Image (tube, rainbow, N blue to C red):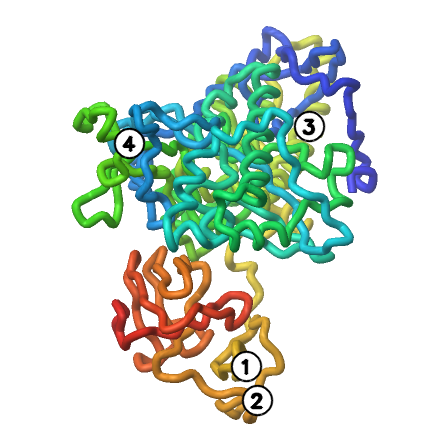
Amino acid sequence: MLADASVTHVRTAGGAQLDSVQRLHAGDPASLSGLTLEDGTAFAARVFVDGSYEGDLMARSGSSFTWGREASGAFNESYAGRREPFGPMDWAAVSPYEPDGTLLRGDGAATDALAAPLGAGDAMVQDYNFRLCVTKNASNMAPFPKPAAYNRSEWTLLFKLAATVPRGAQLSEYLNSFQPLHAGKFDMNNGGLLSTDCAGCSWRYPNASYAERRAIVARHVAYQQGYMWTLANDAAIPAPVRAALREYGLCADEFTENGNWPEQLYVREARRLVGDAVYTQNDVLAMRAYSATNESAGMGSYNFDGHYSHRGPCLPNAARDGCTMVTAASPPMTAAQRANSSLVWTGGEGYGAKLTATYELPYSALLPQRAQTSNLLCPLTPSVTHVALATVRMEPQFMILGQTAGTAAALVAQQRAQQQQQQQQQQQQQPRAAVHDVDRAALAGALLAAGQILSAAQFPPRPPPSHGYACGAGRCFGTVTGSTLAPTYANDSTCAAACVPLAAGEWLALKAHWRVDGASSMTAVESTYLKKSEEPASGLPAELKKAVPIKTQLQLAKAAATADGAYWLATLAAAGDGARE
């Protein structure tokens, strides 16, 4: 693709990184003219795009930036600042302390750093991990490696969690994100209170030196490899969990030069630009029509997804269905109280919220303050708040913003080239065209011609969903377009006698909304519905759905079974069971 676009891709020997940037001249102090790498390699350009997670070019350019979390009052954002554990998967009734009251050993397990007051800002960023490419195909499987410096004593918190029954007996309690890829491969991500995210390991990364970043990356490798190896092999982990994880392994044909381990750490957030305008949670939710004035840089659609910024001690509430993080204002505890899991729990401090609608991203989010830098665009470190970044940070949106930044850079570079020629002829030194002043109509036209989606008005009309019936787990129920089940029976609710209808106490439960606690219970991790069909609950009559509040635990007559790829078949032990019509 790079060659097709006549782009020269330069790889430096030894991975030399950015050292310094140069300004154009006194007559245009906001313009960058070039950059120099650590090995002395120099590059000149008319326009620059910082396409990194870290924003090193942005920072060295003199552009304002920030990191961490704004206070909730800074931009009047309800999700901003320090948060409490978000849902039932974000705490466990195990203490993170040793019997003597000291924090359990284990890099990346928990931190005893006191949490800021609720809603206050701090310098913490989301936890990082590696997105592993795994497989169940034995012929292409490499085992999860054991770190050379492995120390079993560092996994005591994991062992304490594993000892909780039935919570600790399910692989989904530790790893619950296996997204199917091609050729029998899966993209494995963090999932659960104690999982592949390295707690607190990312805090220094945004502004660290290159040497310190390499050490932080190595720290993440050691943590995640140790976690995977322990979960798959240690006898303290329940046998069903070990057996389930040993069905997977690293893909032997991926990352072959790095031991089948990804080279890129998943940097969920680092520095963020502070431009003349800052895109916030409220802008996302308002779904502002930037396209009406050719200001749209593309569209986003992902949920607000803030991974833990902090995992450590929290104090259970009276109902013991949640906890609050320990702060400087919390009651002081004795060593014996710290070690008592009736008094102090382990909690993960993150947040999440559904976002079902698409939204337009503003071009202004890519721009430094005009007076600081006039020829730099920052698509991966945009001018957004910590909360807005929780939805903007997904790679599809970064690719969209990258396309917009590259197109704008090309347009402005052409204009600056013409200005350069004129100024040389006239022997002048004047400010040249800024990325802030790109012709918005020309930019929108170029993006649209390339297939970029700038507004919902471009969406093709959706065909009405097709309805039918299919068999899953031996039961017949309604399906819609996109179901993984086949064949679909158009008119026969009994699936042409291939299976039987759902019984009165049998319901479909969307897997993403439930935590299966064991063979006898499951818990709603968000407010949801039990249904008799895969059709959206909004279109089902009352008798075919039951509303279930978040944190509701359902008692099961038998273990939940997979009805299809997205739904459990749940057989309730008693009618109602916390659900309501």
Foreground label between 1 and 3: 1
Residue furthest top as drawn? 26
Q: Amino acid at mark 1?
A: Cys
Q: CA distance from mark 1 to mark 3?
A: 59 Å
Q: Earlier in the sequence, mark 3 or mark 4?
A: 4
Q: Is residue 417 above or below residue 522?
A: above
Helix, strand or loop for disc 1 = strand
Label 3: which residue? 413
Report if the CB atoms under discs 4 and 1 are less than 8 Å apart: no
Helix, strand or loop for disc 2 = loop
The front one of 269 and 574 is 574
Q: Earlier in the sequence, mark 2 or mark 3?
A: 3
Label 2: which residue? 498
The front one of 151 and 473 is 151
Q: Quadrant of the image for the N terminus?
A: top right
Residue 553 spot, x, y in % from top left = 30, 61
Label 4: which residue? 339
What residue is shown at x 57% (from left), y 14% (from top)? 209
Residue furthest front as drawn? 235
Report if the CB atoms under discs 1 and 3 are less than 8 Å apart: no
Q: CA distance from mark 3 to mark 4?
A: 62 Å
Label 1: which residue? 471
- Count of numbered circles in the view: 4
Report if the CB atoms under discs 1 and 2 are less than 8 Å apart: yes
